Amino acid sequence: MSPETLEELRRILGPHGLISSPEEIKTYECDGLTNFRVVPSAVVLPNSAEEVQAVVRICHRERIPFVARGSGTGLSGGALPVKGGIVIGLARMKRIIEVDLPNARIVVEPGVINLEVTGRVAAADFFYAPDPSSQSVCSIGGNVAENSGGAHCLKYGFTTTHVLGLEVVLPDGSLVHMGGKTLDAPGYDLAGVFVGSEGTLGIATKITLRIVKRPECVRTLLAAFNSPTEAGAAVSGIIAAGMLPAAIEMMDNLSIQAAEAAVHANYPNCGGLLLVELDGPVAEVDALMAHVDEICRQHGAWEIRVAQSEAERALVWKGRKAAFAAMGRISPNYIVQDGVIPRTALPLILSEIEQLSIETGLRVANVFHAGDGNLHPLVLYDRRIAGQEKAAERLSERILELCIEKGGSITGEHGVGEEKKHMMSKMFAEPDLQTMQRVRCAFDPLQLSNPTKVFPRPRMCGETPGEYVAHPLEVAGIAERF
Amino acid sequence: MSVAERFGATVVEPADEKETAAILRNANETGQAVIPTGGGTKLDWGNPPRKADMLLSMRRMNRVIEHAWADLTVTVEAGCTIAALQRTLAEHGQRLAVDPLWPERATVGGILATNDSGALRLAFGALRDLIIGVTLVLADGTIAMSGGKVVKNVAGYDLPKLATGSLGTLGVITRAVFRLHPLPRNARTLTIAATDANDMQRIILAILGARLAVTAVQARPGKEIDILLEGTMDGIAAQEAVIKEMGAVREGSPAVWKAREELWGDAPIVKFTCLPSQIASTSTSFSGFVIQATGIGYAPFTGDLRRLREAMEREGGSLMILGKSELDAWGNAGDALPLMRAVKAQFDPKNTLSPGRFVGGI
């Protein structure tokens, strides 16, 4: 990057809004996926949408690629910098702009932390539903980019369900609005496409979210089974009985051991642990909880506990949410994987993963969002042993291939990012990917916004054809274009 | 007059995606304008097409391809009617949790293209929240799948949402995958008569603000508010007790949930959007109406549509005309309109599909 461009950025952002010294810039060389690292040319920390626009306009003019970054907790390398590019850090844009309780809406800037949204409305008995495990540190802007999920999306949906409107700086620096506080705004559902586009379509600078009234009660049940397969059969029983719990989580013995070592959640030591959470009116939840209890026992649960207090419930969840990090207690290194299968394929894929584990001699711990078939296999290895890291990567990828074979997906909530873009061609045919990239060409014909992510190969956008044809209403002077 | 006659178009009924692709490719190359259609119930929604040489009917593509009931998903062809789909799903105690207009005739592709969902949206979300996969045939004959068969999936762009509500202007929806919900164990409709518009507003916000789990809420003329409760008998009874504190409650008829269909008559129907807190003030513009608690309303209207639209848009809402009108059907699409045009240009550069029916002449 030329000294003139750096100077121009400094003028826009002030001396504290531009980071270009080699020591400081290293902080931004990776996100939560630390095995990919690229040092960017500069990092900017804008305070407003206007500053974001000014930076992006320079990028557009100078053809400098840029990557937006929230808290940097992503697990697929989505915020990995691009060589020669700029990182636009949005952590300073953390204002909550409007809270509208009667209409259950909240308008925030992208740097606001996920849990702060709930914090802001909790006193009025509202909460923000998407709850990724990193919710105490991850940002709403990052959640929007990744379409983050969490344990409770089984009932409440993903980030995209809760984003009603967006203000976006497009890759040419223009500012547009998608959706809004009211529903069904005329036109294409651009907000629906933008959410989960992993920073490749522009930068959200203002986000209108839906908040949810807290249910009258929440009950969490822990059931101990001899194996994940038995626990999986119980999940099928719950679904077949016509229930939609707020969350159904499963952990295998290895993950239980790790979670116990890390946070002492007091889990029963069993082969397959099921965590079922129901919420709603007390009378409804009590009736259904009795039914869940019965189904679990029918499928071989030998210990069932219902959290008796909010503190007990919090502890149960703490163990589950700490499961990834807890792997550090039982293995020097590990890979967190994120795949999805149709839920009924669970017993089959578990036995296949076990077989792979035996063949490779690598341990695999399994943590699932069992209700929706989202698997988080954790492949454990030791980097110091020659060849083990490569073997772990291969095993991890093999699990994703098994997910695809079963009609599933290579990612349920972590995103494609840098890590999985080569897997996209295994999940989608070339025409599918080319069609998705038509959207990209409409938003970002120069491919400056987080280029090199998501897709295995860029699409040449070229000049968009299409001759302008005046609408009859326009000709008649009834309607006009704006 | 048949739909085809009205458009002066040839009706073509492909049997599968490959045929659809071949027909579209040919139309695209020879400059014919194509209007995709399902049951034909909403062909007059949107603006009249600038050109319509062919009605591409999905009528023969009407199979339920796979009801993976244990996974709570279904893969279905676009021409399947909603009623036929629901009958298949009910065999395993499930449903697509959406209540569109005219389900006996309306098709999967049609309700997706027009984004038509009903009062159940309060509890289950709109079609955008229920669709998890889509197959589109583009104007140039490209067959493209996006999303998938699993509920949780963030691989690639979310084209199912882009297709939903695009009124056949980006591609022909040939197949969709939905997440499903169990049929309710029990259902009960309650109706509250409010004393005036302010009371109606108060009650709606009180229901939304209470820690209940209501499935649907709608307002009708006569300050009537209908509430749908679903679940266990115990759960319904407990919620009913809370609602009784809010006003004079009586047992309602399940037929009230068809009130939206009954609005259709001689007068043009408008769909309007507002915030839940604006329902009462918005309702005063109409004599007959159904306004759902999500802030989406439908009403016949014969007055000055332009002024009404201006008033709605000033308040942050919108007004869409569902049927023939002198006025543009959509209203202000905002500052993202150039971007929408760019998307259209990428998907259908020759304006083969439904030219002119959508916002801003798209």
Image (cartoon, coloured by chain):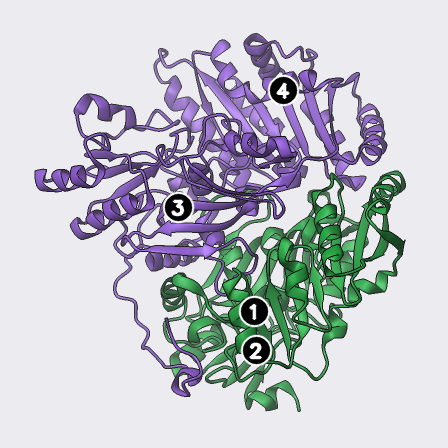
Residues at marks 2 and 3 touching, judged by CB atoms closer than 8 Å? no
Label 1 sits on residue: B319
Query: Closer to the N terminus: mark 3 or mark 4?
Result: 3
Q: Amino acid at mark 4?
A: Asp
Quadrant occupied by the N terminus of chain B: bottom right
Q: Position of residue B317 (x, y in %)?
A: 54, 62
Can the viewer see residue B107 in this picture? no
Q: Nearer the viewer, mark 3 or mark 1?
A: 1
Q: CA distance from mark 3 to mark 1?
A: 26 Å
Q: Colour of chain B?
A: green
Q: CA distance from mark 2 to mark 4?
A: 61 Å
Q: Residue at x 89, y 38 (%)?
A: B234
Q: CA distance from mark 1 to mark 2?
A: 9 Å
Can the viewer see residue A144 in this picture? yes
Q: CA distance from mark 2 to mark 3?
A: 34 Å
Q: Nearer the viewer, mark 2 or mark 4?
A: 2
Q: Position of residue A229 (x, y in %)?
A: 70, 26
Label 2 sits on residue: B305
Q: Is residue B141 left or right of residue A132?
A: left
Q: Amino acid at mark 1?
A: Leu
Q: Position of residue A110 (x, y in %)?
A: 41, 39
Label 3 sits on residue: A204
Label 4 SS? strand
The residue closer to the viewer here, B200 or B185, is B200
Task: Give the answer, above or below, for where A78 lies relative to A471.
Answer: above
Dot 2 alpha-carbon crowd within 10 angstroms: few under 14, some 14 to 19, many 20 or more: some
Tally the marks: 4
